[in-house]
Image (cartoon, rainbow, N blue to C red):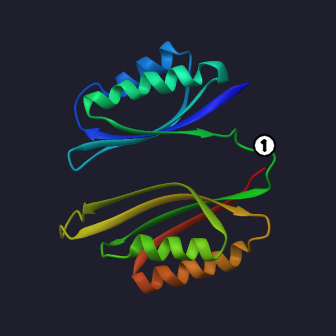
Amino acid sequence: MNAFLVITLIGADRPGLVNAIADRAAAAGANWLESSMAQLAGHFAGIVRLEIAESEAGKLEASLRELEVQGLRLTIERGVAQAAGASLRSLKLELLGHDRPGIVREISSVLARHGASIERMETMCESASFSGEPLFRASIEAHLSASAAPADLQAALEALANELMVDLKLEAAAQG
């Protein structure tokens, strides 16, 4: 039987942080399944999902904890295998518009009200190419349950896009 470890990490950015985790995972025989990491405001932050034999999971956790003395803060949680055959629909949302406070709150609120669960979200602020004005960009992958109404969600997101004056691209695809 295998265990799934979900590890969040944050620390002052420096070379070798990913390698330190990868070395310990490989030494324990863990499989690196997925991750998302970034340098943010001088800190390195990330999340990693590893799969490892249940009998080795405790040893890997202890090995990873040794990195905390080097200033890396870790949270390690046991995860579960992803359920196969769940009747979910996939949704991809791309948004671009002038930056202002509250955009993430408003988008996530609409998604939550319509039963969408965010699987992955990436956001960033960048300068517009000609004006230099701050632009907000978001890429969101979400799942809708079989009972959710995609047309209602789409209408609500389009209404929000008009209110926020942002460009919205929405793609839905059946899954499972």
Comparing 110 with 27, the one in front is 27
Q: In terms of image quadrants, where is residue 163?
A: bottom left
Q: Residue at x 53, y 75 (%)?
A: 109
Q: For this view, does 167 lie left or right of residue 169?
A: left
Q: For this view, does 14 lie left or right of residue 105?
A: left
Q: Position of residue 41 (x, y in %)?
A: 22, 50
- Seen in the picture, residue 49 relative to 144 is either above or below; the reply is above
Q: Position of residue 174 (x, y in %)?
A: 75, 57
User: What kind of element bears circle 1?
Assistant: loop
Comparing 173 with 13, the one in front is 13
Comparing 71 with 100, the one in front is 71
- Seen in the picture, residue 108 relative to 27 is either above or below; the reply is below
Q: Residues within 10 Å of mark 1 (few under 14, many from 20)?
A: few
- Seen in the picture, residue 41 relative to 67 is either above or below; the reply is below
Q: For this view, does 34 lie left or right of residue 67?
A: right
Residue at image mark 1: 84
Q: Position of residue 173 (x, y in %)?
A: 70, 58
Q: In terms of image quadrants, where is residue 155?
A: bottom right
Q: Position of residue 23 (x, y in %)?
A: 41, 17
Q: Residue at x 79, y 64 (%)?
A: 146
Q: In terms of image quadrants, where is residue 132?
A: bottom left
Q: Residue at x 58, y 24 (%)?
A: 57
Which amino acid does the dot numbered 1 rest on? Ala
Assign the N terminus to one quadrant of the image: top right
Query: Number of labelled discs?
Result: 1
Q: Residue at x 67, y 40 (%)?
A: 80
